[in-house]
Amino acid sequence: MAKYILASIILFLIPISVDNVSKEHNAVSEFRLLHINAKWNANNNLELGSIQGCQVQYALLEEQPKSLQSKITYVPVLLLFKKDTPVAQWSADLSFKLNVSKDDIIKAIELNK
């Protein structure tokens, strides 16, 4: 778990280019979920819709700085932030698919309130 938090902190220090912010964008959301995937893997995007109290953002790996691209091993990856602190991370495996549900994300948010 510590290596994931450390990786999240490193990822957080690199500027991220976000191409699509959910319709439920709320500037005062306590939580932010960042979904990063590659163009070639778009069919494995995890469509989350809206999550109450959480801003959901989508970003393309190809549009990120090389320093960030080199740190991401598998896509897609989800990073959950509380304010500016990473609190959870989910990554795909060799199948390049995320095995996480919206309920898993909501539970992580509840645990970190």
Image (cartoon, helix red, strand yellow):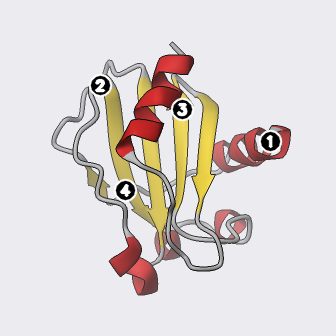
Q: Is residue 39 above or below residue 24?
A: below
Mark nearest the camera among 3 and 2 is 3
The residue that label 2 is drawn on is 27
Per the image, label 1 sits on a secondary structure element best described as helix
- Nearer the viewer's eye, disc 1 or disc 2? 1
Q: Which mark is residue 81?
A: 3
Q: At label 3, which amino acid type do we have?
A: Phe
Above or below residue 90? Residue 98 is: below
Instruction: Tell me the distance, in whole angstroms, between the alpha carbons under discs 3 and 1.
Output: 13 Å
Mark 3 lies on a secondary structure that is strand
Q: Are marks 3 and 2 in contact (CB under 8 Å)?
A: no
Helix, strand or loop at label 4? It is: strand
Query: Where in the figure is residue 46, as x and y percent of width and height?
Result: 36, 61
Q: Is residue 67 left or right of residue 95?
A: right
Among numbered discs 2 and 4, the one appearing first in the sequence: 2
Measure the C-alpha gap from mark 3 to mark 2.
14 Å
Label 2 neighbourhood size at 10 Å, few (<14), some (14-19), many (20+)? Answer: few
Kind of residue at disc 2: Ala
Chain-order first, disc 3 or disc 1: 1
Report the residue marked by disc 4. Answer: 58
> Which residue is pictured at 26% across the width and 26% down the height?
52
Disc on res. 6: 1
Precedes in sequence: disc 4 or disc 1:
1
User: Residue 103 in the image: x percent, y percent?
Assistant: 39, 38
Q: Residues within 10 Å of mark 1 (few under 14, many from 20)?
A: few
Q: Secondary structure at mark 2?
A: loop
- Marks 1 and 2 sit apart, C-alpha to C-alpha, by 26 Å
In this view, the residue farthest toward the top is: 113
